[in-house]
């Protein structure tokens, strides 16, 4: 013992007193690849109102640990995804780690829609792997004409991760990371009526209408367009109830027309309310017959009287909602649709009207947190009654909206067009009967500190236009409906395509 103590005191042997020894792990660079998981297999069928896993993504790591921050995927579909899906979820085992709504896509080809799961924090262990599973959630009701085969795919660079050294990884895929699946109607359980609004771009959008010399606005065609589908049985349609809301003036008549513009029925006002009913004389003579599993398209047309004292620059607004549809089954029983379908606001003026149409829109995802957001849109303006004047500055309002919030910021607009200018250069002029095209480019610089990690998109909110009396141009502002926006959503920043 004495010898041992002497050796320890001399430093030849370590002391036997309690010591704390800490081993510091050394981070190493990850080596990642993306592969197709065995499950789910291809050919999965999802019926309306149900959900199912459609693609498994294996993230294989032969280096140090890494954290997955983003996974991007492409849905190949011959119809707009919103006609089939409500949302898509991403799972790590039994835990849902992200979700995106079906309308949060960037359209990259005629039948390809790109989605992003962002803000992830999924650990891929050192020399291990992780499987992420994409789940599709189908709408409660889908049109049988939209069902069929779809494909979901993950490409090289669609996954992004960062390892313990802070190195960013966007690995290539190994093989084909893709699965096909189908969406189908639910098993028939009885006859039913399905009523739904016509989808973009065919749904009626907000427009301006001008009154004639009698202060009347006639044949407001497609105030609302909707589809009626007969599920599992042929149905005789015998009653449609429509609410027509006008804030200034009188609705003189309302008609129901078919896809060819033929009048199906004239409406009867219910008492002193805004409700109009289209009804058949009896069951033997229905409004129309909808064949089994077929769909018919109907539109609401209205005639309106505007008050003579309505200011020339003040519009009246009108909109329509279908609140009730009923019919007779082939066995004589009654089938009723429960719900409602609403149209957009239309603007009614006493004087000159400018029609507009958003022809196209696009949005460039930002490359870094400090990049400038940029969006473009082509807007056509038609002068229906007299020349229409558009200011050369501040005519269009464009805002940047943030997902999940109401916070917006006004963006500047740069014009690039060949429309007539007046001598003083303050207005672009669209001559009566002509259509002028405006190519808009909206820019918004990053705020101080950079963009937060979120989804942003542009919205085209309003347009100023007017008519000239003598030397004076009187302007009016018309609002665009939200779904007329530059509503292509970006990828989250740091995610350039």
Image (cartoon, rainbow, N blue to C red):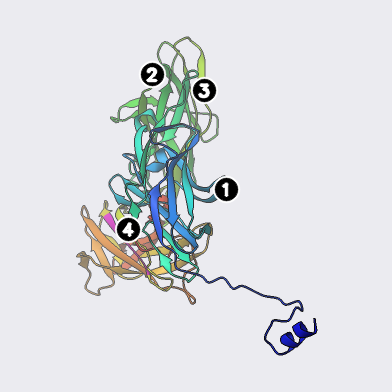
Q: Position of residue 199 (x, y in %)?
A: 37, 40
- Judged by depth in the image, the label closer to the viewer, 3 or 1, is 1
Taking the image as shown, residue 93 lies to the left or right of residue 115, namely right
Query: Which residue is drawn at the image coordinates 67% and 86% (left, top)?
Result: 12
Main SS category, magenta section: strand
Q: Is residue 242 magenta?
A: no
Q: Residues within 10 Å of mark 3 (few under 14, many from 20)?
A: some
Q: Which residue is mark 2?
A: 292
- Judged by depth in the image, the label closer to the viewer, 3 or 4, is 4
| Quadrant in which the N terminus is drawn | bottom right
Q: Secondary structure at mark 1?
A: strand
Q: Secondary structure at mark 3?
A: strand
Q: Secondary structure at mark 2?
A: loop
- Judged by depth in the image, the label closer to the viewer, 2 or 1, is 1
Work out whether 215 lies above or below 415. above
Work out whether 13 lies above or below 431. below
Work out whether 300 lies above or below 314. above
Query: Which residue is drawn at the image coordinates 48% and 71% (left, top)?
Result: 165
Q: Which residue is mark 3?
A: 336
Q: Which residue is mark 4?
A: 362
Question: Number of callouts in the render?
Answer: 4
Q: Which residues are magenta?
A: 373-381
Q: Position of residue 467 (x, y in %)?
A: 31, 61
| Quadrant in which the C terminus is drawn | bottom left
Q: Which residue is mark 1?
A: 95
Q: Nearer the viewer, residue 277 or 74?
A: 74
């Amino acid at each position: 013992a004495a010898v041992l103590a002497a050796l320890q005191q001399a430093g030849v042997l370590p002391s036997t007193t309690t010591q704390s020894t800490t081993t510091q792990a050394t981070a190493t660079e990850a080596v990642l690849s993306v592969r197709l998981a065995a499950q789910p297999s291809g050919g999965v069928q999802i019926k309306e109102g149900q959900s199912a896993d459609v693609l498994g993504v294996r993230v294989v790591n032969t280096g140090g640990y890494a954290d997955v921050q983003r996974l991007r995927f492409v849905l190949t579909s011959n119809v707009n995804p919103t006609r089939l899906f409500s949302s898509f979820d991403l799972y790590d085992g039994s835990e849902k780690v992200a979700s995106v709504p079906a309308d949060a896509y960037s359209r990259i080809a005629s039948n390809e829609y790109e989605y992003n799961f962002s803000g992830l924090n999924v650990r891929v262990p050192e020399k291990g792997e992780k499987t992420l599973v994409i789940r599709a959630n189908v709408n409660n009701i889908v049109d049988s004409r939209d069902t069929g085969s779809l494909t979901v795919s993950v490409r090289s660079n669609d996954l992004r991760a960062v390892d313990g050294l802070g190195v960013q990884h966007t690995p290539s895929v190994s093989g084909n990371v893709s699965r096909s699946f189908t969406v189908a109607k639910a098993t028939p359980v009885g006859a039913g009526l399905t009523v739904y609004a016509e989808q973009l771009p065919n749904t009626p959008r907000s427009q301006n209408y001008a009154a004639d010399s009698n202060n009347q606005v006639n044949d407001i065609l497609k105030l609302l367009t909707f589809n009626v589908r007969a599920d599992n049985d042929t149905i005789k349609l015998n009653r449609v109830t429509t609410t027509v809301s006008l804030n200034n003036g009188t609705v003189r008549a309302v008609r129901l027309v078919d896809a060819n513009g033929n009048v199906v029925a004239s409406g009867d006002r219910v008492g002193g309310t805004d409700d109009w009913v289209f009804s058949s004389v009896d069951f033997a003579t229905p409004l129309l017959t909808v064949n089994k599993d077929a769909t018919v398209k109907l539109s609401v047309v209205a005639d309106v009287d505007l008050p003579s004292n309505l200011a020339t620059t003040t519009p009246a607004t009108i909109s329509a909602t279908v609140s009730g549809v009923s019919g007779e089954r082939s066995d004589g029983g009654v089938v009723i649709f429960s719900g409602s379908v609403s149209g957009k606001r239309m603007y009614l003026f006493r004087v000159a009207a400018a029609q507009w149409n958003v022809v196209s829109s696009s949005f460039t995802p930002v490359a870094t947190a400090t990049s400038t957001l940029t969006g473009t849109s082509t807007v056509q303006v038609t002068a229906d009654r007299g020349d229409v004047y558009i200011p050369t500055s501040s005519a269009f309002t464009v805002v940047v909206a943030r997902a999940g919030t109401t916070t917006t910021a006004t963006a500047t607009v740069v014009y690039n067009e060949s429309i007539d200018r007046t001598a003083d250069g303050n207005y672009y002029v669209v001559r009566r009967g002509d259509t002028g095209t405006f190519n808009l480019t909206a820019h918004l610089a990053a705020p101080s500190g950079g963009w937060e990690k979120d989804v942003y998109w542009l919205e085209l909110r309003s347009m100023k236009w007017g008519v000239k009396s003598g030397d004076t141009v009187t302007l009016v502002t018309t609002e665009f409906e939200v779904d007329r926006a530059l509503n292509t959503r970006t990828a989250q920043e740091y995610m350039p395509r």
